[in-house]
Image (tube, rainbow, N blue to C red):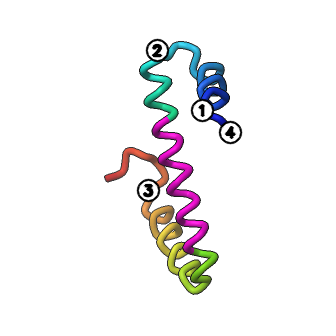
Amino acid sequence: MERDEELDFLRKLYPGLTEDELQAAGDRLDEYLDLALRIYERLRQDPAAYPLLKALLEERRDKGGDSADDG
């Protein structure tokens, strides 16, 4: 997705944001997607890492750590 398309999408999703806020949201989205891609690529290169990731996610879920406010 091109940057203009990304910002148009975010503008529709969050119509109350200023242009600066939209730019920041676009930057955060890019960072999040880069992280997701790095995780995916790591798991493709090292399939043995998947059970560890799954265990960590399950442990977090079991502790009630589903919210982004956990620290």
Q: What residue type is labelled 1?
A: Arg
Q: What secondary structure is the magenta-colored segment mainly?
A: helix
Judging by the rendered image, the residue that carries numbered circle 4 is: 1
C-beta proximity under 8 Å, tags 4 and 3: no
Earlier residue among tags 4 and 3: 4
Q: Where is residue 46 in the image (x, y as percent from the top left)?
A: 57, 83
Magenta stretch: includes residue 66: no
Residue stretch in magenta = 27-42
- State how far apart marks 2 and 4 are (Cα): 21 Å
- The disc placed on residue 65 is 3
- Left or right position of 48 against 71: right
Q: Where is residue 30 in the image (x, y as percent from the top left)?
A: 52, 43
Judging by the rendered image, the residue that carries numbered circle 2 is: 18
Magenta stretch: includes residue 34: yes
Judging by the rendered image, the residue that carries numbered circle 1 is: 3
C-beta proximity under 8 Å, tags 1 and 2: no
C-beta proximity under 8 Å, tags 2 and 3: no
Earlier residue among tags 1 and 2: 1
- State how far apart marks 2 and 3 are (Cα): 31 Å
**Other-residue count near label 2 (Cα within 10 Å), few / some / many at <14 / 14–19 / ≥20:** few
Q: What residue type is labelled 4?
A: Met
- State how far apart marks 1 and 2 are (Cα): 16 Å
What kind of element bears circle 1?
Answer: helix
Q: Which of marks 2 and 4 is in front?
A: 4
Q: Which of marks 3 and 1 is in front?
A: 1
What kind of element bears circle 2?
Answer: loop
Count of numbered labels shown in the rendering: 4
